Image (cartoon, helix red, strand yellow):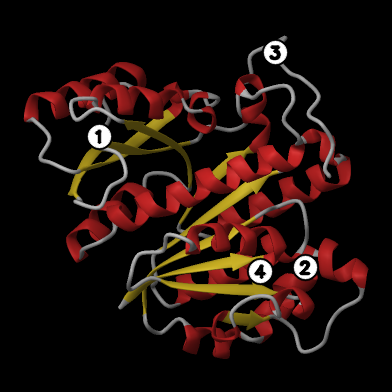
Amino acid sequence: MKPYIIGLGRRGSEIARTFQQSVPSGCIILYADTDWEDLNIRPESARLPLGGQTPSEDLRYKDIEYAFHVTMRGEERLRDRLRGARVLFLVTGTGGGTGPGAARALASISRGMGLPTVALFTVPFRIEGEKRSRRALMGRSQIVREAGWTLSFHQEALLPMADPSMSVRELMQATDETMAMAIRGLLHATEGADDLSAFVEFMNLSPTGVFGYGLSDESGGLKSAVGTALTSPFISSMPLTKTMGWFLVLCSRSPLPQDDVEQARSLLVERMGRLACSRIRLCLLDSLKYPVEAFLYATGDFGEPLYPSGVFFQPAPLG
């Protein structure tokens, strides 16, 4: 049984491709799309074509219901493809139609199989237009209803911390890289049977979550790594007082002192309160690029991000 990652639509497939560059052994990556032309650039054995014919331009990119129904029509074939999975990660954007529609369908199928499922999705910038924002709002609500747990990445949260010279495309790439980090941490969090059970218990607290990442290039920098994770844009923009639980994955090259781990726990309690569900998973990995990495997941009814006023800039357009 292996972890499966499915990139949905053009954006989700690009994020999955970003992760594939450092994919651990034993992890299966697949690409699903209603656009068979886009699928042709993916590895043949990893393609999941959705729908029997190429739809019109309008349906292909904009119609969530179309993507949902053509995905559900292939339910038996998709079930067969997922038989070897022990946990499923769905990755998608929400501004188009294929991603949210197919994510909703696959989450429903995997739930029927009893397969733990996490959906990770991006939320468009406001500059991308009102239509994409409305589609994203509808798509997100549908994914949240079907998936076991969701991680949202509101790209607007990057703006207060980004260089004003950055383009939308560069900010999207930064989001993609953060989502790849989130998947890497999730793989560590669900590595063994007991680990997966503990994470599913955490997922059951609330259907929505956020992610923060931090690192330290010093062997004693655990508190610094956790502090960076807490202040990273996708988690610090949320009202953390609404947190119902947190799950921290700490990866290091050498064993972490227990006192340092407890200091990290105290820092999280200080920011998010004493919660019924708070877990720390320690991973010892010789191959780490940095001495310490922190992957922080918080779950709760966060709603929309809280952006500081007066710090936004207009990012350079795509292209």
The front one of 245 and 56 is 56
Which residue is label 4 attached to?
A: 102
Where 249 falls versus 115 (above or below)? Answer: above
Q: Label 4, secondary structure: give it.
A: helix
Mark nearest the camera among 3 and 4 is 3
The amino acid beneath tag 4 is: Ala
Counting residues from the start of the chain, the first of labels 2 and 4 encountered is 2
Q: Residue at x 84, y 61 (%)?
A: 62
Q: Is residue 59 left or right of residue 148?
A: right
Mark drawn on residue 248: none
Query: Alpha-carbon neighbours of circle 2 within 10 Å: few (<14), some, or many (≥20)?
Result: some
Q: Residue at x 29, y 58 (%)?
A: 190
The front one of 243 and 263 is 263
Where 223 falls versus 147 (above or below)? Answer: above
The amino acid beneath tag 1 is: Ala
Mark drawn on residue 65: 2
Query: How far from the left and from the top, in percent, is residue 188?
Result: 29, 54
Q: Residue at x 60, y 21 (%)?
A: 161
The alpha-carbon separation of the residues under discs 2 and 3 comes to 37 Å
The alpha-carbon separation of the residues under discs 4 and 1 comes to 34 Å
The alpha-carbon separation of the residues under discs 2 and 4 comes to 9 Å
Query: How far from the left and from the top, in percent, is residue 208?
Result: 49, 44
Mark nearest the camera among 1 and 3 is 3
Which residue is label 1 attached to?
A: 276
Quadrant of res 268: top left
Q: Residue at x 33, y 70 (%)?
A: 25
Query: How far from the left and from the top, in percent, is residue 214?
Result: 38, 32
Query: Alpha-carbon neighbours of circle 3 within 10 Å: few (<14), some, or many (≥20)?
Result: few
